[in-house]
Image (cartoon, rainbow, N blue to C red):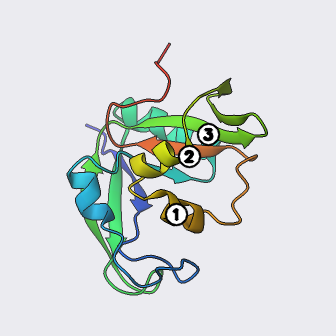
Amino acid sequence: MKEKKIYVLTVSEFFPRKHNKAGLPTGFINSISSLKKIHTIRDNYEWWANRADKINNGEAVLSVRCWTGKPYNSKQREVFVFERIGVEKLQLDPLGWFINDIDHDVTTEQLAINDGLNIEDFKNWFKGADFTIPKAIIHFTNFRYLPIM
């Protein structure tokens, strides 16, 4: 039997330096465990969609990890392994949020809550991010903003 590929996704245990809550705990690990944080938003939609296909086809798993110390300068510890994930495309234009190229009535506040943040922390976390470039919503649960066709 062929060994499954492991794709790594790191989550922050502490708010990053650029955030107004820098150094304080994010609570992401507990929020994922308790199903309060049901997704994460990342760059590289196409890259994540390709990985999701491999994970959902049984060729790979998603290893969710956190840093044991300073990010990028410490070892990582695995906190979750997902054998199934969902990925949706997220973009913003003057009309609002588009998910999978469909105009959607989801609010920024709902995206924030599902991402494990309040609205102010979400805005601060993504300050300067260009949401006109497609982002990936990586789902840890069966929840999707749009039904799968």
Distance in Å between CA atoms under marks 1 and 2: 10 Å
Distance in Å between CA atoms under marks 3 and 2: 11 Å
Residue that numbered label 2 is attached to: 108
Residue that numbered label 1 is attached to: 120
Left or right of 13 on screen, residue 43: right
Secondary structure beneath dot 2 equals helix
Residue that numbered label 3 is attached to: 90
Q: Which amino acid does label 3 sit on?
A: Leu
The quadrant of the picture occupied by the N terminus is: top left
Using the rendered view, name the quadrant where residue 10 is placed. Answer: bottom left
Residue 17 x, y percent position in the rendering: 54, 84
Considering only order in the chain, which callout, 1 or 3, is on the residue closer to the N terminus?
3
Residue at left offset 69%, top offset 60%? 129
Q: Which amino acid does label 1 sit on?
A: Glu
Camera-side residue of 33 and 53? 33
Distance in Å between CA atoms under marks 3 and 1: 19 Å
Residue 72 x, y percent position in the rendering: 48, 80
The mark lying in front, picked from 3 and 1, is: 1
Residue at left offset 34%, top offset 58%? 64
Q: Examine the rendering and report whether any part of residue 111 can be seen.
A: yes
